[in-house]
Amino acid sequence: MGLSDQMPALAAAVSRLPGFATVETADLDPLPTTGLAHDHIRIVGTGVLLRVPRQSQLALAARENLIYQAACFRRMAASGHTPKLYGIIEPTPEIPMGSLVVEEISGETLTLPAGLADAARALAAIHALPLPPVAERSPLKDPEDAVAATLEEMLVQGRHLSSPHAPVSKSGREAIEAEIDTVREEIRHLPSVTKTLISFDAHPGNFILEQGSGRAVLVDLEKGRYGGAGFDLAHATLYTSTTWDVATYSEPSVAQIADFYATWLATVPKELGSALKPWLLPMRRIMWLWSVTWCAKWAVESRATRVADKHAAASAEDWSAENTGGTLIDHVANRVECYLSDAIIARVRSDWRGDNALTGLLSE
């Protein structure tokens, strides 16, 4: 079911929420599609957006997906760098994935590389939030070993590297496999990871520099979890992130990336920064491995027919190109091919191979 088919039901559902009784279909203004997982609809004149999922990136059922996302918004709100959550619209046959009702952040996308410092401070505010007791962390992911869990996700995605539909060469696969072996050996000698609340989707295109306040606001929170902050720092600055979104395309130098990490280390509580510093380079490598194996997964699974009746599906994960189509799919396919190319694999690996500003900072 397309977004246009859902509009009357969405308007009716919004009108039943406190404070929105007068909302009609004509008041809903769909925004341009920029991502694979959500549509966004402005409720004109209210400062509020409908965040309408197209799928669940965590393979959850439609209702559980909304509950999970709502928890992400609520947990991160105390940072002062995420949108407010106003409500939930439950999934129905007419609105298969339901919707969140969230604050619209008015402003501009980050300008990179200068905006990386703003992103570092926003992430530091999230990472510095007090860690709740274990019993209060559900429904967010909270693996006992956050690094092992992320490596397992990466390995499951990595099975797609051997598919003929994954645009990666034999030498590219061997390079990725070599990195997996190296990082697994490297982390065996590190202390336990200090966990914090993280977004796990901190690429620069997910930040808006708010008009007026000037704060960087992280607006895409659906994959939040308790894990290693280094994953967010990597996701904000890897080549596979800074060149993903057309609006924030940039190729920061290693020195500029080192400045980003230095800003984060200077902003978070000293004890947290010191505990996580030995993990920042290994987590950078693991996040890159997670990203390129996701690329292989997307190349394979985007060829499938989209999932029908998502409101009733046990898993609403669905990377089918039929969900989006058009120029966005062409853009994603281009990025996937780029990131899995021999040249870019070698370029990214140079971040942590040999002496440079980044390895120097994080090895002090």
Image: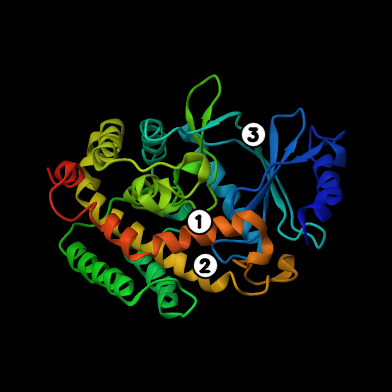
- The structure residue drawn at horizontal position 83% and vertical position 36%, both measured from the top left corner, is 27
Vertical arrangement, residue 225 with respect to residue 118, above or below? below
What is the total number of numbered labels drawn onto the structure image? Answer: 3
To which residue does mark 2 refer? 298
For the residues labelled 2 and 1, the Cα–Cα distance comes to: 28 Å
- The structure residue drawn at horizontal position 33% and vertical position 52%, both measured from the top left corner, is 228
- The structure residue drawn at horizontal position 30% and vertical position 31%, both measured from the top left corner, is 267
- The structure residue drawn at horizontal position 34% and vertical position 67%, both measured from the top left corner, is 151
Report the side of 222 relative to 46 (left or right).
Answer: left
Q: How is the image coloured?
A: rainbow
Report the side of 83 relative to 3 (left or right).
Answer: left
Residue placed farthest to the front in the image?
A: 343
Q: Amino acid at mark 1?
A: Ser
The local crowd at label 2, few if under 14, some if 14 to 19, many if 20 or more residues have their Cα within 10 Å, is many
To which residue does mark 3 refer? 104
For the residues labelled 3 and 2, the Cα–Cα distance comes to: 29 Å
* Mark 2 / mark 1, whichever is N-terminal: 1
Q: Label 2 near label 3: C-beta < 8 Å?
A: no
Please state which of the two labelled residues, at mark 2 or mark 1, is closer to the viewer: 2
For the residues labelled 3 and 1, the Cα–Cα distance comes to: 26 Å
Please state which of the two labelled residues, at mark 3 or mark 2, is closer to the viewer: 2
* Mark 3 / mark 1, whichever is N-terminal: 3
Judged from the image, the secondary structure of the residue bearing numbered disc 3 is loop
Q: Splitting the image into 4 quarters, where does residue 118 fall?
A: top left
| Percent of width and height locating residue 226 | 41, 53
User: For residue 138, which numbered disc appears in the image?
Assistant: 1
Judged from the image, the secondary structure of the residue bearing numbered disc 2 is helix
Q: Quadrant of the C terminus?
A: top left
Vertical arrangement, residue 300 with respect to residue 269, above or below? below
| Percent of width and height locating residue 59 | 57, 66
